[in-house]
Image (cartoon, grey):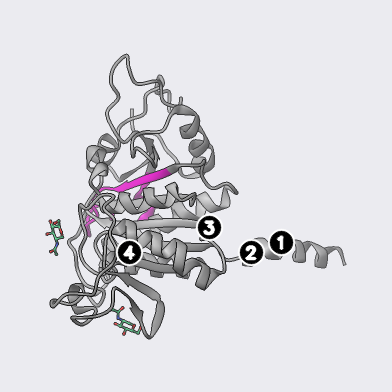
Amino acid sequence: MRSTAFAAAMLPLATAAVNVVLSNDDGWAEMNIRSLYDGLTDAGFNVILSAPADNESGTGSADAEPTTVGRRGCEFMSCPPGSPPFGYNASNPRFNYVNSFPVTSMRYGIQTLAPHFFGSAPDIALAGFNVGTNLGLTTQISGTVGAATEAAREGIPAIAFSGTTGAQVGWTTPLQTYQQVYADLSTTVTSVLVHSGLPYLPNNIWLNVNYPDVSDSICSSPSDFRFVLSRINNAVPYVTPKDVYTCHNDGRLPTETEVVDTEGCYASISVGVATTKLDAGAADQQVVLDKLESILSCLPA
Ligand SMILES: *[C@@H]1O[C@H](CO)[C@@H](O)[C@H](O)[C@H]1NC(C)=O
Ligand SMILES: *[C@@H]1O[C@H](CO)[C@@H](O)[C@H](O)[C@H]1NC(C)=O
């Protein structure tokens, strides 16, 4: 009897699926977002993909009413010319395109698709992983960051993922090592954040995660990687308030660029304010440090 009650009490934690809206700026048919979809789905997340019909890299927080697809069709011929402004894969309606910007696609996922598929808002919103890093000032123009910060502005905890290796390739190309590794690492970060409990992130806060190069000889396995808490932008001496204290750092986190450039396989996790896309303060960094402690490391001295 006791063990039955215990099992029943554990059941909701083990089975309640976490609802995810996934977007990007490289487009709905790019292989990276499809490999992250697969990684998350295999890990038990309930995922809806809602991303631009075309390559919208570098479009920041641009936003516009979706239009009919032009004469070139969706990227990689993933939909024919003249397709409607919104569409989905008839074999898998969880794959949705929006013929507009990353922000517009993320909002459609949150406000229209999530109520339809989940009966509620999503629990978390993810963007990426992007083809190429989004480090420092690049975050201001990144569409992937635009999508993540849009979600956070709408009250949904959000993470942007980006990786150094690779070019934009279509969803039917064979899965590469770097895609497998980045998808696996991104799923790990998401799982650890979710297991840290609600609220997943403070209000108006998003995470910016960047991965260094992956090849067959370096950083070829997820287990080679360490995550390091970082800043998005350089601190201004005497002006920028102290960061959270960790790794004997004297109140100043390394920048995400320093982390990703450090020899070894160091991935950066920065804590950002959605409305400005700039660094969050020490109090919000502390919340994230506590939540992700089990996967965070220090840079080598
Ligand atoms: C996608 O757009 C970006 C920014 O305009 C551009 O640099 C890149 O080459 C484009 N990718 C492809 C495959 O056309
Ligand atoms: C749509 O789904 C089918 C079945 O999974 C797949 O064969 C096809 O490549 C998909 N197309 C796109 C654009 O996702």
Say if 262 sits above or below 118 in the image.
above
Q: Are marks 4 and 2 in contact (CB under 8 Å)?
A: no
Residue 40 located left or right of residue 82: right
Q: Crowding near pointer 4: few (<14 within 10 Å), some, many (20+)?
A: some
Return the residue nearer the eye: 96 or 179: 96
Which disc, if any, is residue 10?
Answer: 1
**Membership of 63 in magenta stretch:** no
Whether the residues at callouts 3 and 1 have beta carbons within 8 Å, the answer is: no
- Gap in angstroms between the C-alphas marked 1 and 4: 31 Å
- Say which element carries label 3: loop
What quarter of the picture does the N terminus occupy? bottom right
Q: Is residue 23 visible?
A: no
- Look at the numbered discs 1 and 2 and tell me whether their residues touch, using CB distance below 8 Å: yes
- Give the distance between the C-alpha atoms of the residues marked 3 and 1, in whole angstroms: 20 Å
Quadrant (top left, top right, bottom left, bottom right) of the C terminus: top left
Identify the disc placed on residue 123: 3
Mark linked to residue 92: none
How far is mark 1 from mark 2, CA to CA? 6 Å
* Front residue (pair 254, 222): 254
What's the amino acid at mark 1?
Met
Kind of element beneath mark 2:
helix
159 up-or-down from 205: above or below: below
Q: Which residues are magenta?
A: 206-226
Q: Is residue 266 above or below residue 22?
A: above
Q: Earlier in the sequence, mark 4 or mark 2?
A: 2
Q: Amino acid at mark 3?
A: Asp
Task: Report if the beta carbon of the residue with label 4 is closer than 8 angstroms to ligand 2.
Answer: no
Q: Earlier in the sequence, mark 4 or mark 3?
A: 3
* Residue identifier under label 4: 180
Kindly report the distance in space between the C-alpha atoms of the residues bearing marks 4 and 2.
25 Å
Foreground tag (2 vs 3): 3
